[in-house]
Image (cartoon, rainbow, N blue to C red):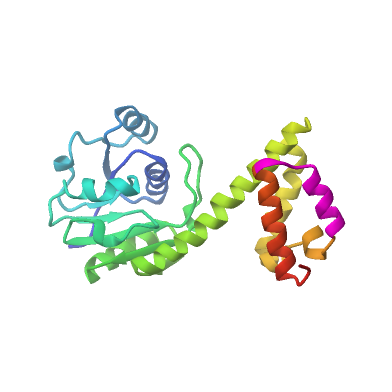
């Protein structure tokens, strides 16, 4: 039976962004369920969507999307009747963690933060299912959100997720370290905003290898030593490690 509507279990970042996407794309969202009553009310009021007081209240023919923490997927799915169509939204958790006999993965490859608008049309969706019928259903739902749909198994998705964590989490932390250092010299982070924007744009245009510039790429070891003398703690270690990687890759070490 084709899917006519979806229901979401979860009230965190992923649920927030998916509800936005369904709301804007015309996908019928029957309702949401979650343990955090405060967040449930916020999402319900914001999007005028129904809330369920139990998992059993979710309509029988709905696709159930688990937008919960990775560690909670197995536990929550075990409370869902075994004949229901259930998918999770995690990049790193195997599909087989879901207890339902009709299961899959519906993973949007993007960083999610509650309250931020995400243009899902630009987001790749990685999908998987143990059922040809459910896989087709997931393609239909995903196609209303994006034209970037990729089928991949759990092992390949885990590797892609690892690459995404390196890109997003580590880059974000490096930006934070830069901002923290600016604070120590009493400068505002806005000073580097144009540089950050051009860096991202150039990586998109040229790829990271061609976009890279700077003292380590050139092999300017005097400049590197001067920078290291200004630093201490974690930031010094990070600077040294990444500089050495760049020096080595460019034959300067």
Residue at screen point 19% across, 61% down: 102
Closer to the camera, 179 or 90?
179
**Where in the figure is residue 178, as x and y percent of width and height?**
70, 43
The answer to whether residue 18 is seen in the rendering is: yes
Q: Is residue 79 above or below residue 143?
A: above
- Majority secondary structure of the magenta segment? helix
Q: Quadrant of residue 214?
A: bottom right
Q: Quadrant of residue 145?
A: bottom left
Question: In the rendering, at what x and y percent does residue 120 appear?
Answer: 47, 53
Asked whether the viewer can see residue 214, the reply is no
- The residue drawn where x is 48% and y is 53% is 110
Q: In the rendered view, would you say 102 is above or below 23? A: below
220 part of magenta stretch = no
Q: Is residue 229 magenta?
A: yes
In this rendering, would 238 be left or right of 217? left
Q: Position of residue 59 (x, y in %)?
A: 17, 46
> Whole-percent x and y of residue 35?
26, 34
Q: Which residue in the rendered view is the most extreme toward the right?
A: 222
Q: Residue at x 19, y 33 (%)?
A: 53
The one of 104 and 161 positioned closer to us in this rendering: 161
Image quarter where the N terminus lies is: bottom left
Name the outermost residue toward the top: 38
Q: Start and end of the magenta stretch?
A: 221-233
């Amino acid at each position: 039976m084709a899917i006519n509507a979806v229901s979401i279990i979860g009230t965190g970042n992923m649920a927030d962004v998916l509800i936005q996407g369904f709301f804007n794309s015309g996908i019928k969202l029957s309702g949401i369920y979650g343990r955090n009553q405060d967040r449930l009310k916020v999402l319900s009021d914001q999007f005028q969507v129904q809330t369920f007081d139990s998992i059993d209240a979710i309509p029988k023919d709905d696709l159930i999307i688990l937008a919960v923490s990775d560690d909670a997927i197995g536990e929550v799915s075990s409370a869902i009747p075994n004949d229901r169509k259930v998918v999770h939204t995690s990049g790193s958790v195997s599909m087989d963690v879901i207890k339902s006999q009709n299961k899959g993965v519906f993973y949007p490859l993007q960083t999610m933060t509650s309250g931020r608008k995400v243009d899902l049309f630009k987001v790749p969706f990685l999908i998987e299912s143990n059922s040809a019928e459910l896989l087709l259903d997931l393609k239909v739902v995903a196609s209303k959100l994006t034209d970037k749909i990729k089928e991949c198994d759990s092992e390949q998705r885990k590797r892609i997720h690892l690459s995404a964590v390196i890109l997003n989490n580590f880059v974000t932390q490096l930006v934070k370290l830069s901002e923290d250092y600016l604070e120590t010299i009493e400068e505002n982070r806005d000073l580097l905003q144009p540089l950050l924007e051009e860096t991202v744009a150039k990586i998109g245009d040229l790829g990271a290898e061609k976009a890279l510039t700077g003292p380590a790429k050139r092999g300017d070891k005097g400049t590197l030593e001067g920078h290291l003398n200004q630093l201490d703690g974690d930031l010094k270690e990070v600077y040294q490690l990444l500089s050495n990687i760049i020096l080595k890759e460019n034959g300067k070490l």
